[in-house]
Image: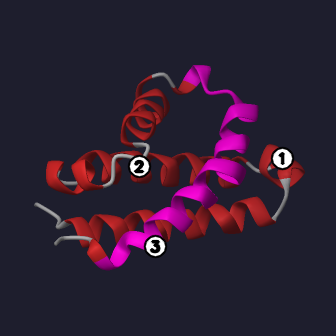
Amino acid sequence: MTRRDDERIQDILEACGRLAEIAARGRSSYDEDWVARDAANYNLTVIGEALDGLSAEFVARHRDLPVRQAKSLRNKLAHEYFVADSDILWDTITRDIPALATRLAAISGTAGQ
């Protein structure tokens, strides 16, 4: 099943929102709750997969999107989950994901065009 760019961006924004809810609970909650960590990893994987699936044309118009980095993180979580560093993941969730959400929200009106 093929998804359009605007659908993929919506998927990313929804995953960013879920990660924001996890971050709002705080680091100690994240560290102590395996369900929160698993949910975070799943949503980071969704973001990586959705960014990687954006059309070449869309990515060419928005070269500042972290497609390569998100795909790399997705691959690490899916294939090398045993080396995932909680500090790096927390930083990604609390710093990089809000910036990505802001950027995608700003350009979401151009998705699929």
- Left or right: where does residue 83 sit relative to residue 14? right
Q: Residue 25: x, y in percent?
A: 82, 64
Nearest to the eye among marks 2 and 1: give it: 2
Label 1 element class: helix
The correct choice, above or below, for 48 with respect to 21 in the image is: above
Label 3 element class: helix
The correct choice, above or below, for 95 with respect to 101 in the image is: above
Q: Amino acid at mark 2?
A: Leu
Query: Residue at the spot x=22%, y=57% of the render?
Result: 58
Q: Nearer the viewer, residue 64 or 100?
A: 64
Q: Amino acid at mark 1?
A: Glu
Would you identify the image quadrant in which residue 21 lies? bottom right
Residue 106 - label: 3
Nearest to the eye among marks 3 and 1: give it: 3
Q: How many marks?
A: 3
Residue 32 - label: 1
Label 2: how many Cα within 10 Å (few below 14, some 14–19, many 20+) = some
Where does the C terminus fall, quadrant-wise? bottom left
Query: Residue at the spot x=29%, y=64% of the render?
Result: 8
Q: Residue 6: x, y in percent?
A: 26, 72
Residue 65 - label: 2
Marks 2/1: CA distance?
31 Å
Residue 90 is a magenta residue: yes
Residue 108 is a magenta residue: yes
Q: Main secondary structure of the magenta part?
A: helix
Q: What segment carries the magenta color? A: 82-109
Q: Amino acid at mark 3?
A: Ala
- Left or right: where does residue 4 sit relative to residue 70? left
Query: Residue at the spot x=47%, y=73% of the render?
Result: 105
- Left or right: where does residue 27 sit relative to residue 44? right
Q: Nearer the viewer, residue 112 or 43?
A: 112
Q: Residue 23: x, y in percent?
A: 74, 59
